[in-house]
Amino acid sequence: MSSHSWSGGKYGVGKRMSLKVTRKIIDAIHSGELNKVEYGTLPIFNFQVPVTCPGVDSHILTPKNTWSDKAAYDQELKKLAGMFQKNFKKYQDKATKEVVNAGPVL
């Protein structure tokens, strides 16, 4: 999961999320429709992600669903979390406890 805009695999394996899908998600944000849908939690990062979005195949809203190699997804998710944690160490002494605790948990 090298980037949230990639679907189906990391860069070089997956593909960029289509503009059509991206526009549907942005439209749902602007219209307030995403305030009315169910959310799930992305493990490790604890992000709340919509389970459904009007006009979007719900399968793609959970990133792991789009990867054929689920173990590779888990590995990339952990790798990304580790990179985040390493980088954040430079700033954590300036951050509140709430901000520090909001980071990924491995």
Image: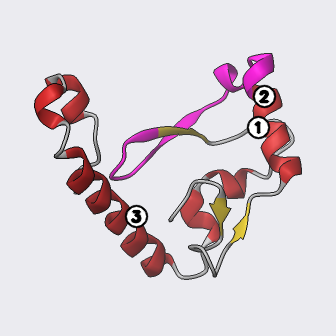
Dot 3 surroundings within 10 Å: few (below 14), some, or many (20 or more)? Answer: many
**Residue 78: x, y in percent?**
33, 65
Specify the segment rendered in magenta.
29-47
Q: Separation of disc 3 and disc 1 at Cα?
A: 22 Å
Residue positioned most to the front:
90
Q: CA separation, marks 3 and 2?
A: 26 Å
Query: Which quarter of the image is occupied by the C terminus?
Result: bottom left
- The label on residue 25 is 1
Callout 3 amino acid:
Leu
Residue at which label 3 appears: 77
Amino acid type of the residue tagged 2 in the rendering: Ala
Task: Point out residue 98 in the picture as x, y percentages from the top left corner.
Answer: 21, 24
Does residue 84 sit above or below 15 in this rendering? above
Q: Looking at numbered disc 1 in the image, what kind of residue is underneath it?
A: Ile
Image coordinates of residue 58 in percent, x first then y, are 72, 50
| Residue found at x 21% / y 56% | 86
Which residue bears the numbered disc 2? 28
Q: Answer whether labels 2 and 1 touch (C-beta < 8 Å).
A: yes
From the top left corner, tell me how far across and down residue 54 is, in percent: 82, 36
Label 3 secondary element = helix
Residue 36 higher or lower than 38, as above or below: above
Mark with earlier residue (3, 1): 1
